Amino acid sequence: SPSLKSLAESKGIYFGGEITQDLLSNSTATSLAGSQFDMITPGNEMKWDTTEPSQGNFNFGPGDAIVNFAQANGMKVRGHNLVWYSQLPSWVSNLPSGQVQSAMENHITTEATHYKGEVYSWDVVNEPFNDDGSYRGDAFYNAMGSGYIADALRTAHAADPGAKLYINDYNIEGENAKSNALYSLVQQLKSQGVPIDGVGFESHFIVGQLPTDLQANMARFTALGVNVAVTELDDRMPTPPSTGNLTQQATDDAYVVQACLATNGCVGVSQWAVGDADSWVPGFFSGYGAATLFDSNYQPKPSFNAVVNAL
Ligand code: XIL
């Protein structure tokens, strides 16, 4: 039977998923991931609260476990992430503003050096914008202004020149105030020679509510000379799932893959889970779930078949 990864590779893209360390002991999930995905993103294991829980004390054990799993299965790794307002230990947000830049640079340098040569890409800055297109007023912005983004990218590039460097965000999949702001930022970074290689479209969707200009929006970013990737695809619905919603989800997910295939410079699609059983959606969006290509028993859903056909 076909695999997502082999079909994706035949079209010059990848198909990935997200996994967490606790799931590595679930052989149903790991064998499915190993057979279907050629790219893996650690769900939490490379985030700041895990990797530097107190200042200067680094813990790469959980991230290393994901990298080892990936390498044993011939997968590449999307490093996720270096700088983010969330899952950020309070010691960072409590720093005097004059100490934030050096703490950020040290964090990036130490983590990106540890994983040098082992990650395909880094989400260097995650979710820097508000939905209205203004910058999120987090510890980094408050201390350094918007220049923290260029500084983070330059610092990551110095540590691992071979990694593709991304800005990753949600609600930027269609053309809107937030994606316009990101577009302007990428344009500015490129004109200043800042190392920016890609934009991650998280793509946390609701069934039947996908932006109709996804492909056009991908194309305007790639026209700036950066790659795009669908980094955290899920398409949630009220649970228990109805047949109608599962059919709509299949249409939605095939449309996302089609948009990527039709865009030179879209490098791949990753869903944010192995399957519905381990998805973050039920825990974060009350009453919703069934958001991935595989059901609560890791069996293929209509979406899986639709994506296979799209590939
Ligand atoms: C989520 C994880 O899946 C959860 O386990 C965690 O509790 C919260 O974060 N955008 C991102 C991801 O970039 O890092 C988030 O992952 C989902 C939203």
Image (spheres, rainbow, N blue to C red):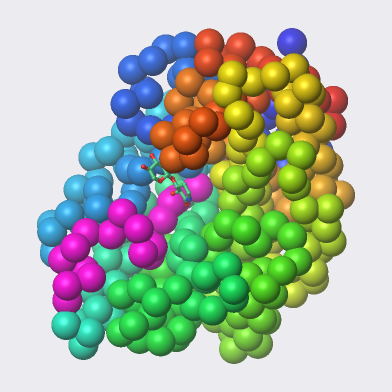
The x, y position of residue 166, in whole percent, is 55, 63
* Residue 29 percent across, percent down from the top left: 47, 18
Whether residue 88 sits left or right of residue 68 in the image: it is left
Name above or below for residue 120 compared with residue 141: above
Question: What's the residue at 55%, 32% (across, down)?
Answer: 288
Residue 1's place in the image compared with 293, above or below, is above
Residue 224 relative to residue 197: left or right: right
The answer to whether residue 187 is magenta is: no
> Foreground: 133 or 231?
133
Whether residue 172 is visible: yes
In the displayed structure image, the side of residue 108 where residue 61 appears, left or right: left
Residue at x 54% of width, y 24% of height: 276
Start-end of magenta stretch? 78-95
**Residue 280 visible:** no
Quadrant of the rendered image containing residue 92? bottom left
How many dots with numbers? 0
Looking at the picture, tell me which residue is in the foreground, 132 or 67: 132
Q: Is residue 80 magenta?
A: yes
Image quarter of the N terminus: top right
Quadrant where the C terminus is found in the figure: top right
- Front residue of 174 and 32: 174
Quarter assignment of residue 206: top right
> Within the image, what quadrant is residue 81 found in?
bottom left
Coordinates of residue 244 in the picture (x, y in percent)? 78, 22
The residue depicted at 73 percent of the width and 26 percent of the height is: 245
Query: In the image, what residue occupies the spot 40% across and 29% down?
Result: 69
